[in-house]
Image (spheres, rainbow, N blue to C red):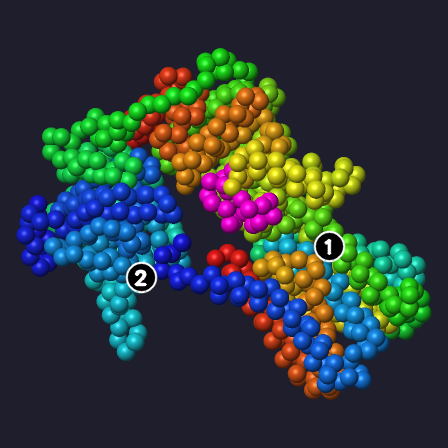
Amino acid sequence: MSEGSHRLSPAFKSALGIFARYATIIGLILMIVVFSFLSPKAFPTYGNFINVLNQASLAMIIAGGLTLAVVVGELDLSIGYAASLHGVVVTGLIVKNQLPIPVAIAIVLALGALVGVINGLIVTKLRVNSVIATLGVGTIIVGVAFAYSAGVPIVAGVPEEFLQLALGRWLFGIPNPIIVMALVVGALWVLVERTAIGQEIQAVGGNPAAARLAGISVDRIKILGFVISGMCAGLTGTLLASRLGSGTTSAADSYLLTAFAAVFLGSATLRDGEFHVLGTFIGTLIIVFGFNGLNIFGAPTFSQYVFQGAILIVAVGLSSLGRMLAES
Amino acid sequence: MNAFAGQRETPASSPFVSATGIRKTYGGVQALKGVSLSIEPGEAHGLVGANGAGKSTLIRVLAGLTQPDEGDIVVDGRRTDVSTPHVANDLGMSFIHQELAFVPGMTVLQNIMLGLPKRTHFGIVDWRQIARDVEPIARRVGVSAPLDANVKRLSTAENWLISITRALIRKARLIVMDEPTAALSAAESEKLFAIIRDLRQSGVAVLYVSHRLDEILELCQGVTVFRDGNSVAELAGAGLTRQRLVREIVGGAIETSQRKAASHLDGEVVLSARGLSRSPKVREVSFDLKRGEVLGLGGLVGAGRSELARLLFGADRPDSGAMTLEKKPFAPRSPAAAVNAGFGFVPEERRAEGLVLTKSLAFNLSLANLGSIVYGPFMPLVSGRRRKALAERAVRDLAIKTAGVDIPVGQLSGGNQQKVVIGRWLQSRPKILILDEPTRGVDVGARAEIHRLIRSLTERGMAVLVISSEPDELPDLCDRVLVMAEGRIVCELEGDQVTRHAIISASYAEAGKREGA
């Protein structure tokens, strides 16, 4: 309401708005087209696309969970470390404790939910800023993972059935992680966009004060966001351990950055800076296609870091641009 | 009138500041309709008026925080544009607001010098020399804290003295004080008055903005009264009496009444509060709210009305006291608990606390009614059709002007946004609806519609509690009005007693009486 603030012309504003909303999708299509021209043999093939989706699936699951945390208005920095821990624990339970695979997975998902509850309680009851809270919890988790595995990867004795979880193609010859991802994305989308609790989730993220005065239990909804984020980290950790055939501390740490970039890219997609599940899906595809292209062209390793860092900044920039336009 | 020692000579008879014909319109609402105000050097000048009369807007204009649409400001005989706060400062005007603006982690001295050029040696600030310069002024004003103390630990009274020191260091010739005694004890207030008198002796003028008429009468040589964006009176000398002030503040508005027959006043009690207190804003409040009535809460801004509403709605917990809802004990632990028990709440800040602005009308309207738009209790999926039907029904019933139920609610006008917040509670049919400033910033037409809507709710047996600071709103709307002052209910008005005059004079009379209590 400062009188001094200059106003953008409406035409320019709406053009900018359209650019902000569709920039990510246009970017994704452009990337696919350019890669296809540059590498017509290797890139635009069914095999490569399935491969990209397969790579995207673990990132998408963890990013989908993170989306729930950011939709309720918080950040969850513990997911990467937590996924690493979960990978170690699930292999440990199977190899060392000889637990049946489904039981081991169920325990790990419960562990993921527990991490979410802890994050949620710290943020809502102790009123610790979520960045600090989840950074702290994440660091403790790193310690727990080292304590559990003594820093030694669990490689020997991983049963073939567990490896098949990520490597198998049980339905229509499609890799299992893609199926799991589709189920998770579908479930999260329905939860946020179509259920009554999803309306409360969106309201809490949109305006916590208004949600509270409308009779919504803001704290419970925020904890729920963290729980879903934690469980998705558990799932990604499990699938990664299965894919690698080992439980390795810090194996999943880098998913944190990918997930954040995907979530912020997603918030700039179709909606004005609002986090949503479908957007996160598109954001993940952009990042994974980008990596895939860089790999195919044999780009040096450093360029992958540059790409990932740059895309995170671009993503957050687009996201806040969208929000600025929606508010002005 | 004293001439200011050591300043360039100003004819003693000419005002230091005079503003004439100031007009200011905010989004279609005329906040100032051509007000004038003139302050002599070394004068303590009072500015009074009911809530929304335009006092704050004029202060913002003088402070350079907002630009008037029309009108002249003359300082020291020269016409000036106060385009920024910096200009106001250079002209010798300092402003002390109710919420004092200090940097909490810094010392008294650092806060006094904030934003001023400081004496340095080779780029290093010479705090010792600055302290030697500031010390005598601070002591004269009565600052007792050491200059190197952290401001965080100091009392409100001490903070006021520091603010005055800060103004004097800036060579202020006019200090504007907005409700200075609101948070001060009687003894602290007396001390402040002594300092104001001392300031006058040295030629510094004070513009004293307050609801406390006794203080105004004690301190001020001249008083300007604002009413509805106009300056309606300038009083001085023998014409300056308490009665006259109240009469000018209230004005001679025609009393309109659409109140219902008194039978509604005998409805059964829905909510009963006994001795509710929450320090420092709510003290020993007891009242009954009856089925089918519109109960108003009147009083000045800061009288504790919104704070009381927050206790009823479970947003805050009382320190002591109890409530019963339909004869059963009621102690909501959260707004969610209150909603479950049959409450609805329309908050004062509709944009900040009432709406999710980026979401659609349908989203916002259905927020308190999610149970009614899902397919079923065991199928908690939201039915788009039901949600749309609910939203369209509300749009029709409330005559909300919108291009559709899917557009973001942030794009609607203020009045229509308010209807959305109210509309949220129409479907869930609460037993008790609390509305805090339901028509603030709403145009006349929408205001009448909102009033009609509130009345129609009571016909279905709902009990409504309305908080309003607009002088005409409660008489229009309420069967019964409780007037609050300083956290207490000081007066109950019923039926024909509910007039604008009665509400305002009760607010002021009690504010005066409680002073120093």
User: Which structural element holds mark 1?
Assistant: helix
Tell me if residue A203 comes above or below residue A104 in the rendering: above
The picture quadrant where one finds residue B115 is bottom left
Tell me the subunit letter for badge 2.
B
The reply to whether the magenta stretch includes residue B410 is yes
> Neighbour class for label 1 at 10 Å: few (<14), some, many (≥20)?
some
Left or right: where B302 falls relative to A278: left
Instruction: Kindly tell me whether residue A146 is visible in this rendering.
Output: no
Residue B182 image offset from top left, x and y in percent: 32, 39
Seen at 54% across and 49% down, the residue is B357
Seen at 69% across and 39% down, the residue is B386
Q: Which mark is residue B240?
A: none
Left or right: where A180 falls relative to B369: right
Tell me the subunit letter for badge 1.
A
Seen at 63% across and 32% down, the residue is B428
Residue B308 image offset from top left, x and y in percent: 47, 32
Labels 2 and 1 share a subunit: no
Instruction: Kindly tell me whether residue B22 is visible in this rendering.
Output: yes
User: Can you identify the residue that label 1 sits on?
Assistant: A189
Range drawn in magenta: B402-419
User: Can you identify the residue that label 2 sits on?
Assistant: B114
